[in-house]
Amino acid sequence: MVVTLMGVSGSGKTTVGRVLAQRLGWRFVDADDLHPPENVRKMASGQPLTDEDRGPWLARVTARVTDALSSGEDLVLACSALRASYRSRLTVDSARQRWVSLYAPREVIVKRLFERTGHFMPPALLDSQLALLEAPADALVIDVTPPPDDVAKAIIDGLKLVPHP
């Protein structure tokens, strides 16, 4: 199974994803690590990506999901997947994939973006991501204002997953 945590930058995809994967005993993959270097440079300079920029990245993420499903690997994937068309492209086998939409009030996200270090995505791009976000109809929606352990538990309970003993 692949559980994809989606949302804007600063919504906790990586932090919660790592906690969730550890609790489940699954592999964790951050789709940010699959961006081509030119995408990272563009975002780091404060320029939002275009759909053309995202094409090779979405192909890499889709390939990673396909590999996991083909090999029977359970995977927690952190991926913004802001548009329905991106989620459609990333959905390889809907019977074995679950989507979790992470959200918090804008002020919570802004605070997190300004507090984090070492990430290429500047806080200035948040508004472009919020403008691009299309709320998913088929996702478990989770408020990420609570601590990551509580959010991971809410995801496990909401998707009826079995934690690793």
Image (cartoon, helix red, strand yellow):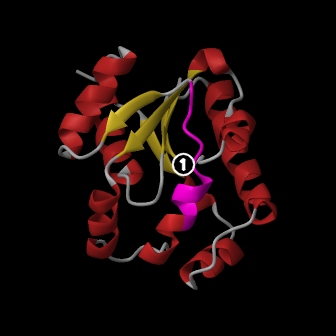
Q: Position of residue 59 (x, y in %)?
A: 76, 49
Work out whether 74 lies above or below 4. above
Q: State the residue position of label 1.
A: 79
Q: Position of residue 118 (x, y in %)?
A: 38, 77
Could you say which is closer to the camera, residue 137 or residue 90? 137
Q: Residues within 10 Å of mark 1 (few under 14, many from 20)?
A: many
Could you say which is closer to the camera, residue 127 or residue 2? 127
Judge from the rendering whether residue 119 lies leftward or rightward of residue 65; answer left or right.
Answer: left
Could you say which is closer to the camera, residue 67 or residue 150? 150
Q: Is residue 148 visible?
A: yes
Q: Quadrant of the C terminus?
A: top left
Q: Quadrant of residue 45?
A: bottom right
Could you say which is closer to the camera, residue 8 or residue 62? 8
Q: Position of residue 125 (x, y in %)?
A: 52, 71
Q: Residue furthest bottom?
A: 45
SS at badge 1: loop
Q: Residue at x 26, y 73 (%)?
A: 115
Q: Residue at x 29, y 61 (%)?
A: 107
Work out whether 37 lies above or below 155. below
Tell me how many marks there are: 1
Judge from the rendering whether residue 8 lies leftward or rightward of residue 54; answer left or right.
Answer: left
Work out whether 73 lies above or below 51. above
* Residue 57 is one of the magenta-drawn residues: no
* Residue 135 is one of the magenta-drawn residues: yes
Dot 1 amino acid type:
Cys
Judge from the rendering whether residue 13 lies leftward or rightward of residue 121; answer left or right.
Answer: left
Q: Is residue 32 visible?
A: no
Q: Quadrant of residue 146?
A: top left
Q: Which residues are magenta?
A: 128-137
Q: Residue at x 32, y 48 (%)?
A: 104
Q: Position of residue 159 (x, y in %)?
A: 39, 18
